[in-house]
Amino acid sequence: MTINPQGQPNKYRSLISQRVEQLSPSGIRHFFDLLASMEGVISLGVGEPDFATPWHIREAAIYSIERGYTMYTSNLGMPELREVLSRYLKDTSNLEYKPNSELLITVGVSEALDLAMRAVINPGDEVIMPDPAYVSYSPCVILAGGIPVMVPTSEEKNFELSAADIEARLTSKTRAILLGYPANPTGAVMPENKLKQIAEVARRHNLLIVSDEIYAKLVYGVPQTCLATLAGMKERTILLGGFSKAHAMTGWRIGYAAAKEEIISAMTKIHQYTIMSAPTMGQVAAIEALKSSEESAAEMVEDYNRRRLVIVEGLNAIGLSCFEPKGAFYAFPSIKATGMTSEEFAERLLLEEKVAVVPGNAFGKGGEGHIRCCYATSLADIEEALSRMRRFVDKHRAF
């Protein structure tokens, strides 16, 4: 029987699934709760665009509501959206996915990731992933009955995952490799030659790769390689993508999975019992985004790039050594010069200077000694945040 903080038996905790009980609450949400109770805070914490969804996308959704398109869609998603998405993947990556059997529209990439894990993992299977990594990766594996196997990455090696480090952790229980590049929280982008090496490991050991490419459009001066385009990888890759980041559509909750028919069929079994279908109005908006939103997406990327340069230069200038991110919209500076833990730094910075960041350990043990700063906010806010952070670091510098 579990014991509550007052030393009394907690009869309700014993009703909770052991699998859920072992999960730690999201480190990001703790700071959002603190933030909600404060005024005058500059937030570099929330990982979403500060742009409104482009008007023509919103207008398409509004028009669909006015016409009464408010019913369920196919479990797989609207046929028109799957057709448009199929053409988009062909045009942008030269990948051919059958719209009626190899594409699934989901409630954001988060649902797609959850479905992928539950569809392919058996109890005790191991899934290899980088550390640090997005906060949902490890919990999704655990909730599916799997075991996350973390591979440390480092600033010295550009937070890139190496094939040798993956191969060193393979066992008879290894089922899949989970990748997320461009990366949240580090902003790292994997070079094609290193992805090819990882792909070779997957082929040699008959492993699946789940590739979360939600930030694929947000890269700065470097190429972004879609994993499924590599030789022999389309049939063993579950490609995850969406509209939240590049099209400023976080609240619309529309994502997708692209994979072999057998895998999409398995994922759809779960999806049809738990979700039924993604929001209809969001699917209509996604069609419009794919058809005519490349220009507005490119403008956002240009703006993010200007902010990226400012925040990275500013962080380094105040003594927080910062790896130059090549993708997504995050900087991941080291705070080791202050002698504080990531959580201590983030909490004290919020309370003393009213700047919200996310402690690096929210993304795994490998994130300790860092903080995540999201630069999807105005230049004015970034500059003011840097000024406040300079004051904070000068006051608390340990050496």
Image (cartoon, rainbow, N blue to C red):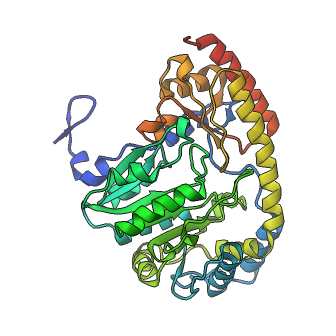
Numbered label tally: 0
Q: Quadrant of residue 178?
A: bottom left
Q: Is residue 10 above or below residue 335?
A: below
Q: Position of residue 174 (x, y in %)?
A: 30, 60
Q: Is residue 212 left or right of residue 57?
A: left
Q: Position of residue 180 (x, y in %)?
A: 53, 55
Name the residue: 71% across, 59% down: 246
Q: Position of residue 31 (x, y in %)?
A: 54, 36
Q: Position of residue 386 (x, y in %)?
A: 72, 27
Q: Is residue 117 left or right of residue 393?
A: left
Name the residue: 67% across, 74% down: 281
Q: Quadrant of residue 318?
A: top right
Q: Nearer the viewer, residue 80 or 309?
A: 309
Residue 207 appears in the rendering: no
Name the residue: 64% across, 43% down: 330
Q: Nearer the viewer, residue 91 or 148?
A: 91
Q: Is residue 46 above or below residue 264?
A: above
Q: Nearer the viewer, residue 265 or 95?
A: 95
Which residue is at the far left? Answer: 1
Q: Quadrant of residue 217?
A: bottom right
Q: Is residue 65 left or right of residue 188?
A: right
Name the residue: 80% across, 73% down: 292
Q: Nearer the viewer, residue 250 or 239?
A: 239
Give the quadrant of the N terminus. top left
Give the quadrant of the C terminus. top right
Residue 388 appears in the rendering: yes
